[in-house]
């Protein structure tokens, strides 16, 4: 897919919810794009990568067809293309990226009673994810349900009488609620995926270098640098409360032998969960700092 340019190609969404978080990821990877986002391509300045700016729906096929070496796309879109058999034999490798999380849900009018998948039997389900919906219906053994493909405004389909239920991406549920619908089932949990490969030679080297940067950003996403002062005798207990990949750093405090400074890296949630315990163990001056990047 390098097309003789020697530059790796990566397809990303040009504009939209996925695009915002994708460009944020690239920025956090220390990469800057040279051209305006109005063109088909943007050049990454720091690495030999060209960014192909397209609609998210086109990304799986561009990568599977070899027009692009890599792509960043929602799992919902990728799995729908795969389940629909549209990727042919070159199904790319996948690496979850942990952002753009959303759920694909089947929703029903609020007045319907729902207790199990069999209740969907015989229903017409409006969706732009027919393959994923049909796979789920089959797995659950739902009898006689069919899909009606719509590319937007699914939530009004029941009121229009063209469907009995809806299968669509739900984030807060606000749109469903406003249209008199409720979630019956979550059939797929989606997040952004890095897709592509297997690659060889120079393209593989560039892709590996990019992945290394992405992993650095992922590692630092929830991690915080925690500094606190504590009695020397409590250091052991505190390290158990704040589990980290490495042992904490212990530093002398000027003018006292009983107290030390403890520095460690851990998830922010851990600090909140154990704040009371840390205080009971004598921790004071607890500082929680953002980490820009964690490279290894
Ligand atoms: P395009 O013009 O590229 O076809 P689109 O309208 O199909 O864009 P967007 O609404 O921008 O798509 O959403 C892109 C992807 O972002 C979705 O396919 C999904 O993976 C993810 N996504 C959708 N809704 C949310 C949400 N509320 N929060 C986070 N991610 C979401
Ligand atoms: Mg789209």
Image: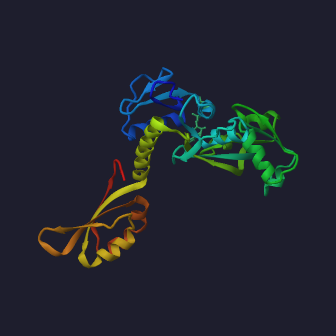
Residue farthest to the bottom? Answer: 233
Q: Nearer the viewer, residue 204 or 258?
A: 204
Residue at 41 percent of width and 63 percent of height: 272
Left or right for 53, reference 270: right
Q: Examine the image and state in which quarter residue 251 appears.
A: bottom left
Q: Residue at x 33, y 72 (%)?
A: 279
Q: Residue 198's spot in the image, x, y percent?
A: 55, 41
Say which of 44 and 146 sits in front. 44
Q: Would residue 111 be visible to someone looking at this image?
A: no
Q: Is residue 203 left or right of residue 28?
A: right
Which part of the image, by quadrant, shows the N terminus? Answer: top right
Q: Which quadrant would residue 78 be assigned to in this image?
A: top right
Residue at left offset 80%, top offset 33%: 160
- The answer, for residue 207, to whether it is visible in the render is yes
Question: Could you say which is closer to the camera, residue 166 or residue 260?
Answer: 260
Q: Residue 132 placed where, x, y %?
A: 72, 43
């Amino acid at each position: 897919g390098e097309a003789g340019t020697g530059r790796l190609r990566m397809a990303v969404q040009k504009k939209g919810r996925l695009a915002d978080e994708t460009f944020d990821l690239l920025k956090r990877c220390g990469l800057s794009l040279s051209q305006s986002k109005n063109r088909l391509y943007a050049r990454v300045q720091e690495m030999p990568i060209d960014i192909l700016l397209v609609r998210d729906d086109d990304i799986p096929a561009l990568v599977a067809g070899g027009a692009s070496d890599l792509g960043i796309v929602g799992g919902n879109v990728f799995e729908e293309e795969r389940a629909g058999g549209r990727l042919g034999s070159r199904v790319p490798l996948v690496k979850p990226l942990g952002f753009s999380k959303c759920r694909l849900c089947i929703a029903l009018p609020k007045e319907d009673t729902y207790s199990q998948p069999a209740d969907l039997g015989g229903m017409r389900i409006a969706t732009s994810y027919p393959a994923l919906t049909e796979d789920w219906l089959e797995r659950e053994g739902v009898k006689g349900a069919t899909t009606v493909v719509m590319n937007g405004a699914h939530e009004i389909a029941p009121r229009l009488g063209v469907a009995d239920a809806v299968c669509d991406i739900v984030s807060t549920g606000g749109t469903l609620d406003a249209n008199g619908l409720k979630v019956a089932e979550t059939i797929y949990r989606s997040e952004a995926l890095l897709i592509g490969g297997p690659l060889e030679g120079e393209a593989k080297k560039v892709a590996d270098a990019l992945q290394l940067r992405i992993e650095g950003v992922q590692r630092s996403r929830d991690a915080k640098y925690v500094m606190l002062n504590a009695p020397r005798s409590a250091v052991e207990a505190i390290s158990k409360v704040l589990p980290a990949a490495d042992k904490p750093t212990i530093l002398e405090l000027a003018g006292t032998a009983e107290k030390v400074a403890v520095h460690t890296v851990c998830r922010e949630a851990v600090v909140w969960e154990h704040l009371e315990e840390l205080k009971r163990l004598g921790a004071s001056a607890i500082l929680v700092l953002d980490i820009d990047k964690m490279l290894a």
